[in-house]
Image (cartoon, coloured by chain):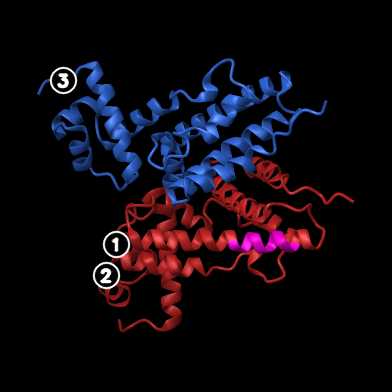
Chain colours: A red, B blue
Amino acid sequence: LGRPKEFEVEDALRCAARAFCAGGYAGTSIRDLEREIGVGRKSLYDTFGDKRDLFLRVLDRFIEAPYPISSRSASLPEIKRMFYGARSLDPADQASLFANVMVEFGVETDEDVALRVKRHLDRLETLFARALERAAGEGQIAPVDVRSTARYLTSSLQGLWVMSRGGTSRGALREIAGVVLSVLRPPTQ
Amino acid sequence: LGRPKEFEVEDALRCAARAFCAGGYAGTSIRDLEREIGVGRKSLYDTFGDKRDLFLRVLDRFIEAPYPISSRSASLPEIKRMFYGARSLDPADQASLFANVMVEFGVETDEDVALRVKRHLDRLETLFARALERAAGEGQIAPVDVRSTARYLTSSLQGLWVMSRGGTSRGALREIAGVVLSVLRPPTQ
């Protein structure tokens, strides 16, 4: 097998992400990655380096992943979709990879991982903040303290992911999401 | 070395918990456990069985752990202590072990682990529900939908633990906790 083409690298990263989501970092062996990606160890090492290098590549890819709130015009409906969207509450969804990573690594274990975790949380917070500003500006919600509310939404999303991994039913997750979003009050007329 | 005495078993479980909290299940080797507990492999196997048996024992112990809201008379102040308490927001605190477990295992991987995760979440939810009922009954908060609010508080706590592992500052965590608790409104006079 020669060097994989670019689209194959993308495919491989997707497969690697699936493996890491299911097994965590420590729980995913090179053998698991070979099987999931469908290439041999040598090809894997030649393209990505070792397991940690591959893992960091997967994280880099995920930091750029699009969300409903990534859109420039995102406001209240997109915030809601972050919590009620079909994919958001799926325990197998790869968007929860970072929740995994934070729990597995903690913050002081690995500087390269910690940097990516920070970037990911900062990005979510920034996207939520922008959507909140727009929602308040357009009169969809009462004014809020944008920074603390954006952080709260970021944290709440991690909580829902954990609960979803813990076997909480879809119905219960939607109920929780309803309470989470109740801090966004309708504007007073 | 003979069979450890009862207090030594308790000590060993505490040390094992610390190791599993730091490394996760897959990331903690028998060698890590030997070092952390300070006994040899044979002693470990004789007393606890294999790594998985020891892990389940640690989980069983944690399901019984006391929280501020464990007190029969717990109401709003104890709910607040769950979110602002010195230990609650500590990324190294072992109370977050279950958040770890949920993320690492997901729900379908291991029936014995899943059972314990469910017991843990049910317990937190029940304790929050009882404290909420008392808080509303004593006029500390406006009436709430107890079940969904208790679930929401359980989920929010998982979120804060993840954020805390992710390196979020103590100040930011307190800010988030403030927004979490803002769904508990003062009673209308």
Where is residue B46? Give x, y as percent.
Answer: 18, 26
Q: Amino acid at mark 1?
A: Ile
**Residue A71, position as x, y percentages in the image:** 67, 70
| Rendered residue at 22%/42% (across/down) | B32
Q: Residues within 10 Å of mark 1 (few under 14, many from 20)?
A: some
* Side of A2 relative to B67 (left or right): left
**Pointer 2 with pointer 1, Cβ within 8 A:** yes
Residue that mark 1 sits on: A30
Between A120 and A38, the one lying in front of the other is: A120
The circle drawn on residue A41 is: 2
Residue at coordinates 46% horizontally, 37% vertically from top-left?
B114
The part of the chain drawn in magenta is A126-134
User: Rounded to the nearest whole Å, what is the CA distance between mark 1 and mark 3?
Assistant: 38 Å
Comes first in the chain, label 2 or label 1: 1
Q: Chain of mark 2?
A: A
How far across and how far down the image is residue B37, in percent?
Answer: 21, 32
Distance (Cα) linking label 2 and label 1: 7 Å
- The secondary structure type at the circle numbered 1 is helix
Label 2 and label 3 in one chain: no
State whether residue B62 is above or below residue A5.
above
